[in-house]
Image (tube, rainbow, N blue to C red):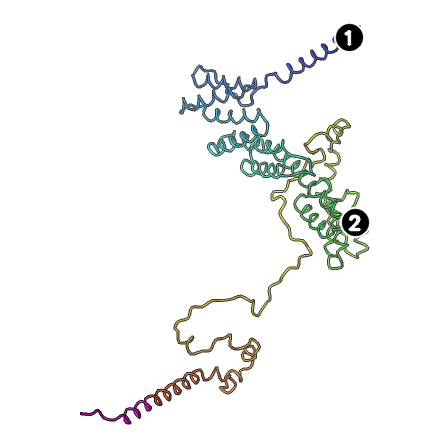
């Protein structure tokens, strides 16, 4: 009896699973860009057949049909639609390989048809390819960085398209993930007492992503890090606290930042009304994650973007490398030598033959000669080697002449003493 009940339950579960699969996995998903023109042209028949295969997830068959259309009817009016449909088939197939192929096909479509309305959609799909592959803030942010670049291209290349508002919101969510990645590093460095590293990360974060949901907390840690770095960074610490008061007036750190500014005897700025209105709108329209989503978020590789901003213009430049504040800034001298080396071509070789080598004089003597005009103009002040460069050569020539004269004299004397030959 118990065995029959277990079999009955397993059959019920199998039926439920099959019903779910039949309604979800094998359900026909409508294609987004169909051609509604009713005609029996052969190229149109091939296109409709490929679209039907894409909607039923027969992607390989659909791509073969679309390639047949493009290779057979090279002057067809459906060439652009067919190329876009090939990219859409890879996008629907998903997977790392499918998404990579879809990105390449979308990029080719934008290159060949930049003025079509579908080019904005293709660029938006490229953004979504990397958006779907984003990981959490404590992991590799390569897909988030690529998604930021691709979504920014939607706004710069197609600012008037219908996909621009959606790309704008996606860009805010992407920058929320990138900012959280930097904030995790700043928080860890601050907790470990590495205040210069924390200040460097925090400064880059608040400058690049002002719409970050925890930008006020990042500014607080930034001001505290500068405060631990000595009196030389007091002004930077005060600037971080003042920015909390001005740009994040509804933050829980605003009153504490005012107290810090009073202790440092620094002026307290007024709250920016635009920033006040933006923070009020964010607080009123912020969606809190449910208990179920929090539980499933632990198992998911995708980041939680529910705290991302809903208003405001996202950063256009993004995160850029910064120089730490502890690195000294070299200010060039207003006047005097800069230490540069100049090279000039000599006009003739007489200067090299007559003048002594500059390395023969020590640097101190050369500097003293340059600073005292009398020593430079008086011949007696110069070194003997510098004034009479020909003297050693003349002495050597005189010795050579004496030697030759003695040898020739000896030869002549020997010639006189020899007896004459006998006849």
Q: Residues within 10 Å of mark 2 (few under 14, many from 20)?
A: many
Residue at numbered disc 1:
3
The image shows residue 231, relative to residue 208, as above or below, that is below
* Mark whose residue sits in front, 1 or 2: 1
Q: Residue at x 47, y 31 (%)?
A: 113
Under circle 1, the secondary element is helix
- Of 95 and 183, which appears nearest the observer? 95
Observer-nearest residue: 342 or 235? 342
In this picture, which residue range is highlighted in magenta? 408-423
Any mark on residue 159, and which? Answer: none
Q: Name the residue nearer the viewer: 98 or 88.
A: 98
Q: Quadrant of the N terminus?
A: top right
User: Which residue shows up at 67% across the image and 53% down it?
Assistant: 324
As drawn, the residue found furthest toward the top would be 1
What residue is shown at x 56% (from left), y 23% (from top)?
Answer: 32
Confirm whether the magenta stretch covers residue 19: no
* Image coordinates for residue 412, horizontal then vertical, percent: 29, 91
Residue 257 tag number = 2
Q: CA distance from mark 1 to mark 2?
A: 70 Å
The image position of residue 212, as x and y in percent, is 70, 41
- Using the rendered image of the protein, determine whether residue 245 is visible from the camera's viewpoint: no
> Is residue 139 shown above or below 53?
below
Of pointers 1 and 2, the one earlier in the residue sequence: 1
Residue 70 seen: yes
Q: Quadrant of residue 253?
A: top right
């Amino acid at each position: 009896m118990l065995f029959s009940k277990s079999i009955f339950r397993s059959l019920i579960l199998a039926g439920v699973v099959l019903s779910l699969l039949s309604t979800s996995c094998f359900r026909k998903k409508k294609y987004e860009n169909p051609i509604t023109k009713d005609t029996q042209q052969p190229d149109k028949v091939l296109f409709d057949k490929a679209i039907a295969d894409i909607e039923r997830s027969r992607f390989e068959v659909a791509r073969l049909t679309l390639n047949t259309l493009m290779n057979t009817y090279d002057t067809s009016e459906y060439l652009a639609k067919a190329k876009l449909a090939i990219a859409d088939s890879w996008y629907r197939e998903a997977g790392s390989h499918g998404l990579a192929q879809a990105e390449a096909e979308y990029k080719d479509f934008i290159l060949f048809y930049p003025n079509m309305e579908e080019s904005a959609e293709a660029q938006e799909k490229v953004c979504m390819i990397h958006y779907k592959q984003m990981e959490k803030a404590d992991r590799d942010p390569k897909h988030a960085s690529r998604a930021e670049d691709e979504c920014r291209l939607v706004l710069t290349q197609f600012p008037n398209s219908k996909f621009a508002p959606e790309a704008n919101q996606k860009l805010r969510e992407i920058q929320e993930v990138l900012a959280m990645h930097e904030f995790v590093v700043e928080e860890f460095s601050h907790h470990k007492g590495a205040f210069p590293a924390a200040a460097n990360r925090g400064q880059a974060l608040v400058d690049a992503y002002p719409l970050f949901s925890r930008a006020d907390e990042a500014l607080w840690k930034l001001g505290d890090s500068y405060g631990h770095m000595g009196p030389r960074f007091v002004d930077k610490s005060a600037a971080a606290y003042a920015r909390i008061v001005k740009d994040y007036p509804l933050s829980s750190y605003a009153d504490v930042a005012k107290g810090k500014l009073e202790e440092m005897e620094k002026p307290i700025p007024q709250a920016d009304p635009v920033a006040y209105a933006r923070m009020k709108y964010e607080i009123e329209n912020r969606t809190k994650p449910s208990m179920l989503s929090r539980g499933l978020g632990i198992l998911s590789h995708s980041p939680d973007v529910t705290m991302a901003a809903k208003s405001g213009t996202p950063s256009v430049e993004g995160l850029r490398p910064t120089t730490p504040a502890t690195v000294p800034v070299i200010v060039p001298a207003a006047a005097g030598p800069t230490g540069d080396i100049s090279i000039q071509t000599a006009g003739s070789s007489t200067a090299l033959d007559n003048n002594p080598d500059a390395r023969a004089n020590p640097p101190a003597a050369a500097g003293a000669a340059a600073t005292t005009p009398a020593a430079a103009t008086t011949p007696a002040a110069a070194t003997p080697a510098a004034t009479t460069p020909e003297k050693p050569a003349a002495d050597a020539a005189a010795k050579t002449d004496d030697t030759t004269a003695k040898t020739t004299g000896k030869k002549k004397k020997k010639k006189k003493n020899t007896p004459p030959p006998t006849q």
